[in-house]
Amino acid sequence: MMDSMPTTQQRKDDHIRINLEEPVRFREVTTGLERIRFVHNALPELDLDAVETRTRFLGHRLRVPLLISSMMGGVERGWELTRVLATAAQEVGCAIGVGSQRAAIEDPSRARLYQVRDVAPDVLLFANLGAVQLLNGFGVEECRLAVAMIGADALVLHLNPMQEALQPEGNHDFAGLLGRIADVCAAMETPVLAKEVGFGISGDVARQLADAGVAAIDVGGAGGTSWSAVEHHRAGDERARRVSETFIDWGTPTATSVRMVRQAAPGLPMIASGGLRTGLDAAKAIALGADLAGFAGPMLRAAAQGEMAAIDLLVTIREELRVAMFGTGAATLTDLRQARLLGGDDHGCC
């Protein structure tokens, strides 16, 4: 049975407040990107002004290989912040995803709380639904509705079994979900992506998703926001708080997940997200095999300060990425994927 709308709305309000006000980072687990270093090129034979960050993803042109990751929607505060971020995405030329549209599927009057095309007419825009809802009454019709609702270019189906397990109102039955995802991929006219929310995607799961027909994978690795920590702050009793606290450091670090997915599905477009903070993080993720780098928490906090703060952060990340490329002698993102890396895996180099 689906949650009642007040419960869905309250949960979204809680998530925004907790992410802005409470400590929700992993305590011990990191992204793994901090253990990776580029081999410095002291003779790049390159003009910094010539470094090119333009790319294509799922057929769409982007001026920078960045994604403002799916976070919010369905409540007034979430819509306000998403519109700020969408305006920034339009200004800088990156992609953006909206938060889960389940609330608007359940109550069409809330569809306006996801709409951003008027401020971001040209961005690569991702619609978003929880994949587990495909086992709870949603199907291809609802997926198409989510895309049409916001004029999206693609649909993200987010995977969040650990978060759902720790929510008292969560959906705990994921049995048979892969087949439902395959059905949606086969029927949809727009690309379908699979995304984890912050616990990582393994190589085995990547192969399953690729075989199911997803157009791309967003690894959503561990090391940034821990949704176990978020649910810990929402827990209504001592047992729930203890259980959620136990899993605050659960997950596969982002760098490891990127490697796993790239090895398992070498031709599949991939987004690296989960704890990225700088353009140097983005450069490392791309060098490891990602096509785009996704940012969530830092962008949320910037949006809370206003439109100019969000734009400034994206421009800063872009410039950090360009300098990192220059420091490796990479004129293009294709060159960056050939850059030499040190550290970060079990063998001490990569």
Image: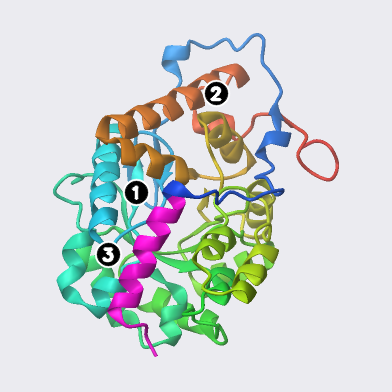
Quadrant location, the N terminus: bottom left
Within-10-Å neighbours for mark 1: few <14, some 14–19, many 20+:
many
Give the vertical position of 183 relative to 159 (above or below): below
Chain-order first, disc 3 or disc 1:
3
Residue 207 drawn at (x, y percent): 62, 67
What sort of colour scheme is used for the picture? Answer: rainbow
Say if the magenta span includes residue 2.
Answer: yes
Give the residue number, with chain letter if any, for mark 1.
96
Residue 337 appears left or right of 217: right
Q: Which residue corresponds to mark 2? A: 325
Q: Which residues are magenta?
A: 1-19
At label 1, the amino acid type is: Ile
**Residue 328 percent location from the top left of the image:** 62, 21
Q: Nearer the viewer, mark 1 or mark 2?
A: 1
Q: Quadrant of residue 111?
A: bottom left
Amino acid type, callout 2: Met
Q: Which mark is residue 74?
A: 3
Q: Is residue 211 visible?
A: no
Q: Residue furthest front?
A: 238
Q: CA distance from mark 3 to mark 1?
A: 16 Å
Main SS of the magenta part reads helix
**First along the sequence among labels 1 and 2:** 1
The answer, for residue 290, to whether it is visible in the render is yes
Circles 1, 2 touching at the beta carbon (< 8 Å): no
